[in-house]
Image (spheres, rainbow, N blue to C red):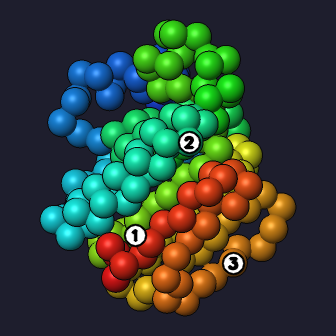
Amino acid sequence: MTAFTISLEPVIHMSDEQFYQLCRVNPDVKFERSATGELVVMAPTGGETGSYNSEINADFVIWNRQAQLGKVFDSSTCFKLPKGGDRSPDVAWIALERWNKLSREQQRKFPPIAPDFVLELLSPTDNLEKTHAKMQDYLNSDVRLGWLIDADNRIVEVYRINQPVEVLKEPKQLYGENVLPGFVLDLNSVW
């Protein structure tokens, strides 16, 4: 269940539309594209990680239904990041006012927008270095808040624009700060 990275440049340059079509004609394969154009073939998650993802996503959906401040997205959503890369965070959230500025076609394809918030749940087979690079892709595209959760080691890395990464050891809760007002993630469902 390891992700594979394939360097296509300079042999082949894949346009945004070609990448979108590649994903459409291969619906059983999850692709991402790094900011440098590398094609990333994502492996499916195992049962434990999939369960954690569902629990976490449910918390976001319940909060968002009550707050009505934006849109929540699951790990099957691919975003075309403004500063490069096509990424699918495990959970993403976009403020409603920003989401509504996209055309219907943009909303239906790979939205050309950086989420306001992203969450990545480190799977046992994920490469930490590549996941850090992915988090940096998010920050480079102005994602305002990001959480990288390492359930095995009970560590959370908190990413914010123009700030050093904050590492939390065994936190009980994570707070949405000014990005997700009033949101609290109870980590008992993860560890």
Question: Badges 2 and 1: C-beta atoms under 8 Å apart?
Answer: no
Q: Secondary structure at mark 2?
A: helix
Residue found at x 35% / y 19%: 21
Question: Badges 3 and 1: C-beta atoms under 8 Å apart?
Answer: no
> Where's residue 151, x and y in %?
38, 79
> Where's residue 161, x and y in %?
78, 57
- Looking at the image, residue 61 sits to the left or right of residue 158; the answer is left
The answer to which of marks 3 and 1 sits earlier in the sequence is 1
Distance CA(mark 3)–CA(mark 1)? 16 Å
For residue 135, what is the image quadrant? bottom right
Quadrant that contains the C terminus: bottom left
- Looking at the image, residue 70 sits to the left or right of residue 60; the answer is right
Answer few, some or many: residues within 10 Å of disc 1's Cα (few below 14, many 20 plus, some between 14 and 19). some
Q: Nearer the viewer, residue 121 or 39?
A: 121
The kind of residue tagged 2 is: Ala
Of tags 2 and 1, the one toward the viewer is 2
- The residue that label 2 is drawn on is 67
Question: Badges 2 and 3: C-beta atoms under 8 Å apart?
Answer: no
- The residue that label 1 is drawn on is 122
Residue found at x 29% / y 22%: 24
For residue 157, what is the image quadrant? bottom right
Is 169 rendered above or below residue 30? Answer: below
The answer to which of marks 2 and 1 sits earlier in the sequence is 2
The answer to which of marks 2 and 3 sits earlier in the sequence is 2
Residue 131 appears anywhere in the view: no
Is 15 rendered above or below residue 168? Answer: above
Answer few, some or many: residues within 10 Å of disc 3's Cα (few below 14, many 20 plus, some between 14 and 19). few
Is 35 rendered above or below residue 71? Answer: below
Distance CA(mark 2)–CA(mark 3)? 27 Å
- The residue that label 3 is drawn on is 166
The kind of residue tagged 1 is: Leu
